[in-house]
Amino acid sequence: MIDSAFRPKYVSFDCYGTLIDFQITPVTRELVGDRLTPAQFDRFVIDFRALRYDQVCGEFYAYQQVLHDAYARTCKKWGLAVAEDAGRRFSDAVLSWGPHADIPDPLKKLGEHYPLVILSNADTSYLDVSVPKLGAEFHAVYTAEQSGFYKPRYAAFEYLLDQLNTPPEQFLHVSSHTRYDLMPCHDLGFTNTVLLDRGYDPPAPVYGYTKVDSLDELNGLLGI
């Protein structure tokens, strides 16, 4: 649990899924069409999510290709042909997404009290489109393209720390993803982390995060 007296130097966020509503399933459904039963498609979505994670655990390369390659691996597992433009269609979808409805007002309020930072698993061009939709001022926005590493690679977080010249214990890091963010944060000494729970990952309280159901709840914990 966050100490009620703790006042972070920076509040850092994951972007896609945490702040921006990560609606990848509709375009996945368009690409798959009627080639799978509803039950099979549900399993396909789970496999696609897992392979997206695996795809970013290596060296950095463009996010559009990451999405295409993870989708292609999932299709191979299911014996499906892959549309040549799948990566572009996923990329276009990402650029069209907006914030979760519960984000803009409390995020703006939080930003009036603390410098806000984003550490995102995407190319810079995606954040250039998505961040203005959030309606808050950010002190800094860092991307996988800038650092050369995707989360959960530790080097992505080390880039954040180096850029801001600030130790991990002075951050409050907020994410809806345990595996991409909160687990590596724990290992790297981020002692104040928050799971904004959107049901993406199984709970893993051993990693010491504070769970909240809304950004308003987090603001309350910070006395805002």
Image: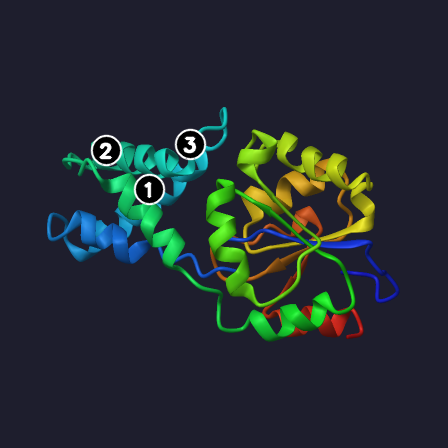
Q: Quadrant of the C terminus?
A: bottom right
Amino acid residing under circle 2? Lys
Q: Is residue 87 left or right of residue 196?
A: left
Coloring scheme of the render?
rainbow
Labels 1 and 2 touching (C-beta < 8 A): yes
Looking at the rendered structure, which numbered label has been put on residue 77? 2
- Circle 3 or circle 2, nearest the eye: 3
Q: CA distance from mark 3 to mark 2?
A: 15 Å
Q: Residues within 10 Å of mark 3 (few under 14, many from 20)?
A: some
Asked if residue 196 is positioned above or below residue 41 in the image, the reply reads below
| Along the line of sight, the residue nearer the viewer: 131 or 153 | 131
Tell me what residue is drawn at x 11 percent, y 53 percent: 34
Query: Which circle's residue, 1 or 2, is located before the other in the chain?
Result: 1
Q: Residue furthest left?
A: 34
Q: Quadrant of residue 155?
A: top right
Q: Is residue 99 left or right of residue 34?
A: right
